[in-house]
Image (tube, coloured by chain):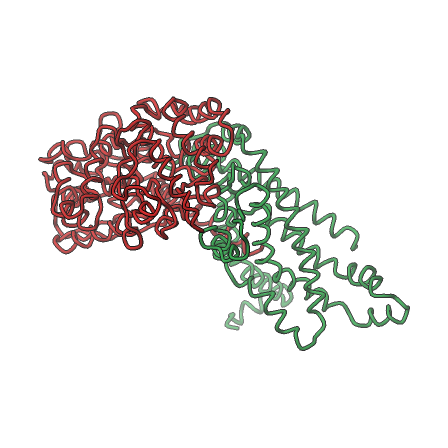
Chain colours: A green, B red
Amino acid sequence: MTVPAVRVHSLPGRRRRRLSSSLAGWGYATPTAAFVLIFFVVPIGIVARMSVSDWKLFTGDQGWNSGKNFQSAMDDNLLWPAVWFTVKYTVVTTVILLALALGLALLVQESNRWTGFLRTSFLIPSALGLASASLLFYALYSPQSSPLLGFTDKPISFLGTPMSALWSTVALIVWRYAGFYMLLLLVGLQSISGDVYEAATLDGANRWQTFRRITLPLLRPSLALSTIMCVTGSLLAFDQFYILTKGGPDNSTITIVQLIYNSAFQGRNDLGRAAALSVLVLGVLLIINVVQFRGLRGKEN
Amino acid sequence: MRLDISKKAIAGIAVATLTMTGLAACGGDSDKGSTAAPAAAGVDGVDDGSELALWTRAPLELQAKALVDKYNSGHKNQVKLTIVPNDDYVAKVGAAAGGGQLPDLFAADIVYVPNWAKAGLFADLTDSIAKLPYADKINQAHLAAGTYENKKYVLPFVLDLSVMFWNKDLYKEAGLDPEKGPTTLKEFKEQALAVQKLNKPGVNGTYFGGNCGGCNVFTWFPMVWASGADVMNPEGTKSLLNGTAAKEVYATWRDLQAAGAIAAGSKDETGATWVAAFQQGKIGVMPYPATLLPTADKTVKVGVAPLPGVSGGESTFVGGDGIGVSKDSKKSSQAWNFLAWLMSEKAQVDVLAANNTSVARSDLADNSFSAKDPRVALINKVAGSAQSKTPVAINFQQAFNAPGSPWVTLFRNQVYGDGSTLDKDNEAVTQVLGQQ
């Protein structure tokens, strides 16, 4: 400490300590706070400003336009189909992904000679970027390059109908993320104490009862985390559809984020309208997440 | 999916940062007169060893690199080339335009040029172009697309034309004359069906991008033009895609689809691989980008014809990219030096024609390279035909090229549906074109 002795004497010791520790506290918090301010608060402020301005991609800010962007966004005839599709996709993905991840986690939780190999092979797809994974599946699905077509006489159209495009994309996402959610749930499974299982066995509980009454309730925090991440991620889906289907066939696989992207960069080139849509999506996401937190935490306490 | 969210956050930050610098730059850039008119520097501009930045999109990489290398080796000015992925180009130019940070020179898909000229992204080149001794020989379709309110903003950078390609070997097998391609829509259909009848596994009559607006703008519009009709009114605000000739075009493809003569996968072809099957020798005849002739020639014996109309006619879509000096360039006289050189015989013949790309000057259509290959001569010739056009509309991208555009809906209903929705679908295109 290089604080001059005189000043040490002039301050009561306790107050000095409190001051320096609160200074240190601020010091620790400042980098994060600056980060949040620059990379979160300011951009959201700009988007909010854009959403109420006549702000085209090429011409920049042309001033306030009194909510016309929101009007125009709500009038988009692709908006409600996109909302419906995004919700459908989110429900399908979340249910399949979490069920499969839980199954995989249960499969690899006990150690035997195959565990290491299985865990690694389930997790490997997570190491691939989503865009790269999408390109890989694009090649798999393309009638011109697909090795899958070697097994059939009649060509399969993986992306040709709205239904097949949805399920083909879900297959990609499940392949890409199952290992990741398996890992999350595995951590939760392994934090359940062995004593509880032992007690259950002594009480004569069978496998199903153990799973239903012990594993699931104690896994709740991990399941809650996975659900929230999966729902939020799926509602913001973009890359996979942008690469695989470009919203087709017949605009059947346009998600909300794609609609935003299209408004900004593909055709309308209207940043104000895209910002208005973003603000709406942000609001809806906030509400959904609050509801999820409440619902998933409620019973635990 | 946390990764997803953070990636999006970063993208958001990037956009926000760009726009912030944009805000800052907008403030200081109010005096737009700071860019000196390049015309003041004479016909050839200035070659004083400046560094010039040039942006273009990835499909033109080959030609852009060859042009820039040749220019740099013979000039004091040095052009620094930046290649941007096709799908990101509009977003990148938009962000730079808002921020006052456009490069000295940048190319643009010719169908977007009217919109970008209207938005004021280019510097006025009217006087400079007028001084060129061969100004009247430069491709008129491109010049017209780059003219807004009587001011000229762009010159042709690289022409990309659409022509009919056929596989000579498959034609021979099917009992067709391998040296004679289709001259009417009906012949096109018959020849495609003949190849289909070979029933060879993996081989089909024809192919098209069934979920790709841009592909069919490029290949179907000329079929309408060759029939003597038009696709839009001259102002580009009203769609005429429900005309008699257009109906014939749709009917041709609908019949081919019904006969199973279109290769599998066309229905969900977004454009990423629409040229691949022909190069693999799996397609009999299809409309194709002329720039890919050297590539296709490596694997297939290619025949080339102009795109035909209902009863004859010869047309092509004069596509590709135009290039202009940006509003933000502080070195417009030096940038003009590059453009003036680009229009010269040295660039057009020694670089573009040498790389099997069409020349953008009608007086150079017959050159030492086209003399070697009659197909190249034919492509050059059809570029100057009266029926060959570049469609001009301010809202072109949104109406036709964008994923999910009303044009995509229109032609999909025509080919895969019963076609009864044509007037309604055409009205939807008009509605987007007419937007202010």
Horizontally, is A114 left or right of B187 in the view? Answer: right
- Residue A285 image position (x, y, % from top left): 61, 43
Residue located farthest toward the right when viewing the structure as drawn: A203
Residue located farthest toward the front when viewing the structure as drawn: B175
- Residue B11 image position (x, y, % from top left): 46, 50
Above/below status of A231 relative to A76: below
Quarter holding residue B29 = top left
Quarter of the image where the C terminus of chain A is located: bottom right
Please tell me which residue lies in front, B258 or B121.
B258
Horizontally, is A295 left or right of B248 in the view? Answer: right
The residue sitting at 53% across, 72% down in the picture is: A5
The residue sitting at 33% across, 49% down in the picture is: B58
Above/below status of B235 relative to B213: above
- Residue A160 image position (x, y, % from top left): 52, 43
Quarter holding residue B269 = top left
Horizontally, is B206 left or right of B131 in the view? Answer: right
Please tell me which residue lies in front, B220 or B155.
B220
Horizontally, is A95 left or right of B284 in the view? Answer: right
- Residue B231 image position (x, y, % from top left): 35, 26
Residue A59 seen anywhere in this rendered image of the structure: no
How many numbered marks, from 0 up? Answer: 0
Residue B265 seen anywhere in this rendered image of the structure: yes
Please tell me which residue lies in front, B197 or B103.
B197
Quarter holding residue B98 = top left
Residue located farthest toward the bottom when viewing the structure as drawn: A113
The residue sitting at 50% across, 72% down in the picture is: A2
